Amino acid sequence: MNAHGGTGLVRVVSMLMAWVLIWGQGCFRSYAVPIAELQKLDGFEASARPSSEEARKLSQHRTALAPFRMLRSADGFSVRFDSSTSLWLEAGASSFGGKFQRIQVTPSLFDGVLLDEAHPLHLELSTVQQARLVAIDAQATNAAVTGAVAVGVGSLLFLLLASSLGGCGIMVCG
């Protein structure tokens, strides 16, 4: 392959690799959550450790210890809420939220401490019009990674085929 023959392909492969690096954290999805589901977050603690009895049961099943809650979205999806999930609450014209370290919910009040802030967030639940979770969508992430790997393998096979043909069989050489 001469210096000019593979330039376009190299650019395409480079762009695909950059795309994989940028989207490497995963695909995120936003879920509308009924306000009543927020009650399930009461007592959430990002750094919580299970009791010794729970830890014993979990160690028997070889499950990783991680605090989380399962919420049901407005469209019926089960959504895992943990320290990597963002929760946004809309009250009036304002939106409050982010990733939480600690949450306490009573029938009338939402109290939470964000991971990156020391000041607690206090909201009366009656003022909250909408709750939204932003969480990693495992299926979309798996599809994106599988697609990126397939394109990468296909590109490598193409390069191998082109080089085995002396660099000119498929590509136009100058």
Image (spheres, grey):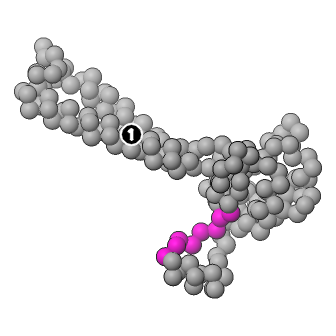
The one of 33 and 47 positioned closer to us in this rendering: 33
Q: Quadrant of the C terminus?
A: top left
Mark 1 residue type: Gly
Q: State which quadrant residue 46 falls in.
A: bottom right
Residue extending farthest to the top is: 174
In the picture as drawn, the residue positioned furthest to the front comes out as: 76
Q: Residue at x 20, y 32 (%)?
A: 158
Left/right of residue 92 with respect to residue 165 in the rendered view: right
Q: What segment is highlighted magenta in the picture?
A: 62-69
Which residue is tagged 1?
147
Vertical comparison of 12 with 56: above or below:
above
Whether residue 68 appears in magenta in the rendering, the answer is yes
Which element type, helix, strand or loop, lies under badge 1?
A: helix
Q: Residue at x 20, y 36 (%)?
A: 157
Residue drawn at x 13%, y 17% is 173
Where residue 99 appears, as percent x and y from the top left, is: 68, 54
* The N terminus lies in quadrant: top left
